[in-house]
Amino acid sequence: MKTLIKVVAFALCAIAWGAQAQVTLNVVSAGDQNMVDYVTNYLGPKFEQLNPGVKVRAVGTGPGDSGSQKIYEKLSAQSKANVKEWDIDVAVVHQRGAATMVKESLLSPYRNQVAAGKLTSRETATNALGQNVDGYVIPMFHSQIALAYVPDLVKTPPKTFSELTAWTKANPKQFGYNGVKGGMSGVGFVMGWVAADGANMEKLEKGPYDASQKAPIDKAMADLKEFNKNVVLTPGNAGTLDMLNRGEIAMGPVWVDMFYTWQADGRLNPKIKLTLLSPGLPGQPMYYVVPKNAAHAELAKKFIDLAASPEVQADGIVKQFNWYPGIDPQYVQAKLDPASWNRLFTDISPGDLSKYGRPFPLSEYFTDILEAYERVVSK
Amino acid sequence: MSSAAEQSSPRATWAGMALVSPALLVIVVFFLGPLLASVVSSFQTKAGAWTLANFDKSFELYSGDVWYTAVIVLVSTLVVGLMSVAIGGYLTLGTNPRAQGVLRWLYRWPLFIPFIVAGQVMRTFLAKNGLLNQLLIGSGILEPLAAQSYLDWRGIVLAFVWKQTPFVALMVAGAMAAIESDHIEAARNLGAGRLRILFEIIIPQIRRTLMVGLVLSYVTMLSVLSVPMMINPNSPTMMTVDVAYRINAHGDYGVANALCLISLLLASVGAWFYLRHGVARKGVQ
């Protein structure tokens, strides 16, 4: 019996000692599974290696804005309950989520306290759907929605939305997108459609919010309803890629990073190509943010500093996960071999990307457009 | 327990209450409380003022989906009923022991498959160039050009029926097996065919079990999110998808709760049947 007590006591001491030596950094990420994989398989181990005694725990909250919404709800609840130390150290969120969190002052203005914070250049580092987020965010990567097409079936891909409409009339049920309830590639297509069809794109992207845009939005939706008669609605972002792959549709909007990853994994016909439409399709960054009362704020900053460093952006973000870099590309390109860099721009040139890669509309317009879609198109 | 009323002393009552209270507490805290909060919030604006706007918006945008949901769930319930009676009937009255054995072994499998997996399976099975159409085309039954996708209401109904039939069939087959064989023998001696025995002798005796099984299936199907999400999240779609969408895309709990309340009304139709026919006669025999 005595031996048993000794063993148990020893074991407890060992556990207590272990727990003391280990600090757990909670990284909570919205987005698809690949976001969690990125932290679990790539970034986490790298950080643990550089910081002995630290354990990175990656948690995913699910794809789309709903993933960010869950993080927001958790932070908001902890804030309202006056909790001193919040249990999310680093969060990865979408633009809408970041905008709300900054507005309700749930985040810490950490960007100027990290070295990598000086490497950001795109407008999205300071502005998220009309909300000033300067100082609170560092983009992890940018992703872009583009039109994927099967070259055997589409000899000359459309260049504008009106060319696309004409193409769907000639090839009914050969274009597919996932509506507004099945993921952001469908939502993005709808946003692009509105900007192309009469609404004031400048106003939608830069603001200020003007309710008079509702009329052109409704008109664009009426046209989209016509357009929908000749197209297929797919079940989700992956659903569009699946249907392209099975040859059920010849064209559809997809996320560029998903597209390249699926091709690299052999899950997608390597012949399928990408193109952008004029006046543009939206893209968005995911942001690294640090909650205001994060329990391990210093460690969190260190983590983001690593994540946003040119080396990690080159090797992890671009080379392994096929995202466009979050920081200024010039720093990243310098760290990459030309082949890896060029692979990212096989189908869409950097010039086209900067011309036709648009931000999403302001939150208020975003909501107006989604509601108009349900009111006009879905009915 | 027949004379429970006479035996109960104040002390026994208190002991009884104490025994029930943990369960009661769980129901009040985790079920009734949230339910009440949900109902209240469906009549409130985000600022907390009383309003009917959430219901206006629900009907403006989603009245089609309410009907779509009701029809899908009712059709599925009906088909589940027919299929489970057919399976139970064959297990009770069939004459080929080997076929019965195979059926008995096979029919329960979907019970152990989660809804989300059923949805995922159907998504590749029923697609335009999916497994089903490939099989039909390969065997010459279907022209390649006539192939179409079943990923609409038909896909949802098929997934529901596939998933829920075993559950009801299990209950029905059990009840059928419990019927005294004298009844069936007597009918057979008097010259009744198997169909007649099924419809005139067996079903009347198991109809309460059948109904309870169907009501439970009806309510379950009403609440499934994964299947419509996987098969057809576009419009028209089932209300569960709309509820998730209102919360996820808009953070709009008001309309989401209003939709939940409408869904609750649909479910309460099932509850009414259940209480009237199930519990009133002391439940499943």
Image: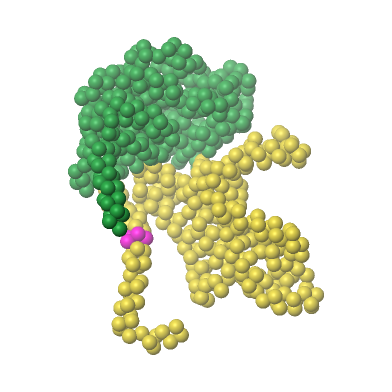
Chain colours: A green, B yellow
B113 with respect to A121 (left or right): right
Determine the residue positioned at 39% across, 49% down.
B256
A171 drawn magenta:
no
Coordinates of residue A206 in the picture (x, y in percent): 32, 25
Determine the residue positioned at 35% across, 59% down.
B30
Coordinates of residue A25 in the picture (x, y in percent): 29, 36
Q: Nearer the viewer, residue A42 or A156?
A: A42
Q: Nearer the viewer, residue B262 or A33?
A: A33
Residue A315 appears in which quarter of the rendering?
top left
A19 with respect to B242 (left or right): left
Coordinates of residue A8 in the picture (x, y in percent): 29, 51
Q: Residue furthest right?
A: B191
Q: Is residue A279 visible?
A: no
Q: Which residues are magenta?
A: B29-33
Coordinates of residue B275 in the picture (x, y in percent): 49, 70
Residue B27 appears in which quarter of the rendering?
bottom left
Determine the residue positioned at 61% across, 47% down.
B154
On screen, A370 above or below B244?
A: above
A118 with respect to A32 (left or right): left
On screen, B45 above or below B6?
A: above
What quarter of the picture does the N terminus of chain A occupy?
bottom left
Determine the residue positioned at 70% across, 57% down.
B102
Q: Is residue B97 visible?
A: yes
B16 with respect to A167 (left or right): left
